Image (tube, helix red, strand yellow):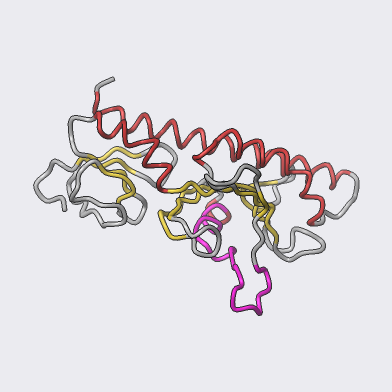
Amino acid sequence: MTPDDHPLSSITALVEAVFDSLDRIAQAMAGLWDGLESQGTAAQSTDLAGLRDAVLGELDRQGSIFNGTGVVVADSVLADRPRYLEWWRRDSREVQARKLMLDMNPHSEYFYDYSTMDWFTAARDRDTRWIHGPYLDYMGVDLYVCTFSMPIRSGRGRFLGVAAADVPLASLDAALMPAFRSSRRPQALVNAEGRVIIANHPDHVTGSRLRTGPAPSRPVPATPWALYALDWPDSS
């Protein structure tokens, strides 16, 4: 492996570790649902407390990479709530994780309508894992984050919602920048909208749009991200 390969391999390893955690949460949710269904019991929001160990386990496993993680339930899946989250978070100042409580009242000015958000709709409509961001999650944690998500389906194929995690941009930078610095060429990790997530060149700050043109790029496998070389004449 050459130094120029380090960023892509590091990005891929981090991404796969995140989705491995989400897959374990998704499997826990599907198993819980299938168990209730086999008993002829309609799932309720209180039943999702059974996911707590799985969610907190992944929050602990990922350490500072995850600010929060959990399950975001599809419309009308639960018998007692039209929408619901079993979501736990911990920031660097907290020892104990705490459950995130958001306003799910559609008549409220603070209504958190996750069913329209890209990280939810992409996983639902495309039946694929997705990464949205970076963006300012002002309703949840007031941090710049990337939200990773993947669909959850029951054993019979019903869409139950998504397993998701908020990964702070600062954590991505801390985890990946050493590999970027080891590269002999300027490179940028770019999202689906062509905006820079991380770069090792001062002219390409996070959030700026990269005019990709003919720049050589390498996709990050099974994600909407790509790694672009910046040492080409028309980059800016």
Instruction: Give coordinates of residue 97: x percent, y percent.
Output: 65, 46
Asked whether the viewer can see residue 212, the reply is yes
Q: Position of residue 124 (x, y in %)?
A: 58, 55
Look at 36% across and 42% down and name the residue there. Answer: 173
Query: Which of the two residues, 197 or 175, is positioned nearer the viewer here?
Result: 175
Residues in magenta, as a range: 103-123
Badge count: 0
Q: Nearer the viewer, residue 81 or 218?
A: 81
On the rendered structure, is 134 left or right of 111?
left
Answer whether residue 164 is magenta in the image: no
Residue 159 seen in this snapshot:
no
Q: Is residue 222 left or right of residue 79?
A: left
- Residue 236, x across and y down, in percent: 16, 53
Residue shown at the point (60%, 49%) measured from the top left: 89
17 horizontally vs 170: left or right: right
The residue most toward the left is 233
